[in-house]
């Protein structure tokens, strides 16, 4: 089969119904709208919120609180996985600048978060990185005896709400 032989499925493409173009077309005179009345007039589709005196559906729904709020203090991290870090030699220093040079991250401006995919066969020295909080993921790093140093203020542990 070639590109010029491709056709849409039979019956899937229909011409648009052109109403009000004379009686011979089959959609003349009233153009499928009946005679008089509100629905025969232009703009009779109505407003979505208007339900003829009933309480509008949207007002019956409960409020969704917190949607649309983005904290200006939120820290965005650039993710890097363990299998990517395995490309570095043993005991080499891994910083966001080094990761950006290699091409694992786009920019060294954001702090780096090390995720738990893959294995790390040897120890590394990493700076300015956040590590997984789950013990099973963190164990992979500790098993390789990696040394880590969290020196950026934005990498500090998040404060508890209400304290």
Image (cartoon, helix red, strand yellow):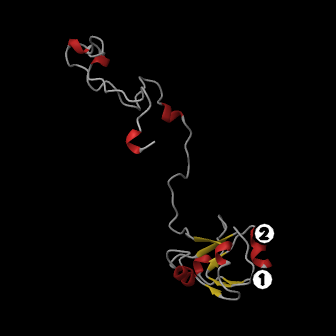
Question: What count of labels does the image hold?
Answer: 2
* Residue at (40, 44) in percent of width and height: 3
Query: Which of the labelled discs sits on residue 145, or is there none?
Result: 1
Can residue 156 be spotted in the picture? Answer: no
Where disc 1 sits, the SS reads loop
- 2 vs 1, front mark: 1
Residue 53 coordinates in the image, percent (x, y): 43, 23
Q: Nearer the viewer, residue 54 or 150?
A: 150
Residue 67 coordinates in the image, percent (x, y): 53, 51
Residue behind mark 2: 135
Q: Is residue 65 left or right of residue 1?
A: right
Distance (Cα) linking label 2 and label 1: 15 Å
* Residue at (67, 72) in percent of width and height: 83
User: Does 8 sit above or below residue 63?
Assistant: above
Q: Quadrant of the C terminus?
A: bottom right
* Residue at (41, 39) in percent of width and height: 6
Can residue 44 be spotted in the picture? Answer: yes
User: Does 66 sit above or below residue 15?
Assistant: below
């Amino acid at each position: 089969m070639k590109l010029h032989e491709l056709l849409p499925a039979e019956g899937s493409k229909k011409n648009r119904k052109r109403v009000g173009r004379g009686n011979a077309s089959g959609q003349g005179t009233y153009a499928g709208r009946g005679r008089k009345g509100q629905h025969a007039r232009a703009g009779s589709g109505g407003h979505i919120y208007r339900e003829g005196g009933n309480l509008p559906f949207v007002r019956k729904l409960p409020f969704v609180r917190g949607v649309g709020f983005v904290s200006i203090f939120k820290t965005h991290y650039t993710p890097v996985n363990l299998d990517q870090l395995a490309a570095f030699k043993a005991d080499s220093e891994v910083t966001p600048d080094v990761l950006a040079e290699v091409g694992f991250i786009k920019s060294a401006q954001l702090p780096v978060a090390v995720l738990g995919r893959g294995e790390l066969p040897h120890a590394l020295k990493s700076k300015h990185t956040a590590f997984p909080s789950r013990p099973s993921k963190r164990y992979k790093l500790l098993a390789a005896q990696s040394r880590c140093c969290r020196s950026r203020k934005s990498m500090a542990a998040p404060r508890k709400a209400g304290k």
